[in-house]
Image (cartoon, rainbow, N blue to C red):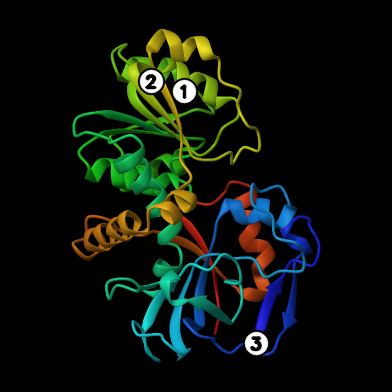
Amino acid sequence: MKTLVCKEYGPPESLVIEEHRDPAPGAGEVLVNIKAAGINFPDVLLIAGTYQVKLPPPFVPGNEAAGVVEATGEGVTRYKPGDRVIVLPQSGAFAEKCIVAEKLCLPLPDSMNFEQGAGFTITYATSYHAFRQSTQLKAGETVLVLGAAGGVGITAVEIAKSLGAKVIAAASSEDKLQFAREAGADETVNYSEVSLRDAVKELTEGRGVDAVYDPVGGDLAQMALRSLAWHGRYLVIGFASGDIPAFPANIALLKEASIIGVWWGTWASHNPDDSLMNMMELAAMVDKGVLSPRVTESYPLDRFADAFSAITERRARGKVVLTFD
């Protein structure tokens, strides 16, 4: 089988495609023929050796995919060969076949194709957890979403809107803002042309926003923090800009604001039952047409460098996936 291997830490283009022997599932494990695998910004950090969790090279990156069960190991009861599944391995998804623990598999809803399933879990689960558990978003509140057209940002727009919030989507181009409007954004801000803080102040008539969803970090974080309303909540999702912001504590004090870190993977490992309930609720929302997973770019394995560049150059709108024959 073909695999995409990180042989040493570096940029995504340093990855190499290798032929490996097909694996066999052990007890409690499932062997899955991967049809598509989702690429996320943390994959870039993991390959570079700068993520908060490190894997020693060589390793096969990738931690979300969708495919078809080929074989099961002893003791597996939930799945059988031929089942369509979403898989969430800690690594190894960027390969034609992947071994996954049974507990890290989910049924792929009939309403989703493999590409949608491959890019569904991490982005939607992160945003849903952020709004449901981390900040308990209420209907009628106003949310500012930074990087609103990106893989995780567009899911925040969709989910916040589905929960009854007013959504202000912020992005760096008109094309991206149009994409966010199609996902349900009520208002948009092009922060490459206008002051984010001034625009939010005008759109909220000086009140500010109840919550900020920030997967970008960098210079925008300071303006977004100052755009919070009284008792506002700032959700730290990630740092796609490459710069980790240093927040002025006095702003949090003056607004009695909360700065909340959101790391879905760790939360899910500590709260597996709640995480499973979240996923079931998300799948039901997709089935009902409330959510519509947007995969805008898919690349065959041999074009992995192009796929990653869509992420690193922040050109992506929606989800980017690798596909396998």
Q: Badge 2 is on which residue?
A: 200
Which residue is labeled 1 in the image? 224
Nearer to us in this view, 250 or 127: 250
Residue placed under numbered mark 3 in the picture: 1
Which residue is located at x 58 percent, y 51 percent? Answer: 41
Name above or below for residue 138 compared with residue 322: above
Spot occupied by residue 302 in the image (x, y as percentages of width and height):
67, 75
Q: Residue at x 45, y 43 (%)?
A: 176
Q: N-terminal of the two: label 1 or label 2?
A: 2
Circle nearer the viewer, 1 or 2 = 1
Relative placement, left or right, of 129 versus 95 is: left
* Spatial CA span between label 1 and label 2: 9 Å
Instruction: Tell me which numbered mark, 3 or 1, is placed earlier along the sequence.
Output: 3
Horizontal side, residue 284 vs residue 325: left or right: left
Q: Secondary structure at mark 1?
A: helix
The quadrant of the rendering that contains the C terminus is: bottom right
Mark 3 burial class by Cα count in 10 Å: few <14, some 14-19, many 20+: few
The structure residue drawn at horizontal position 36% and vertical position 60%, both measured from the top left corner, is 293
Q: Residue type at mark 2?
A: Val
Q: Could you say whether the residue bearing mark 2 is in a helix, strand or loop?
A: helix
User: What is the quadrant of the N terminus in the image?
Assistant: bottom right
Residue 123 visible in the displayed image: no
**Amino acid identity at mark 3:** Met
In the picture shown, does residue 100 fall above or below 284?
below
Along the horizontal axis of the image, is 143 left or right of 236? Answer: left
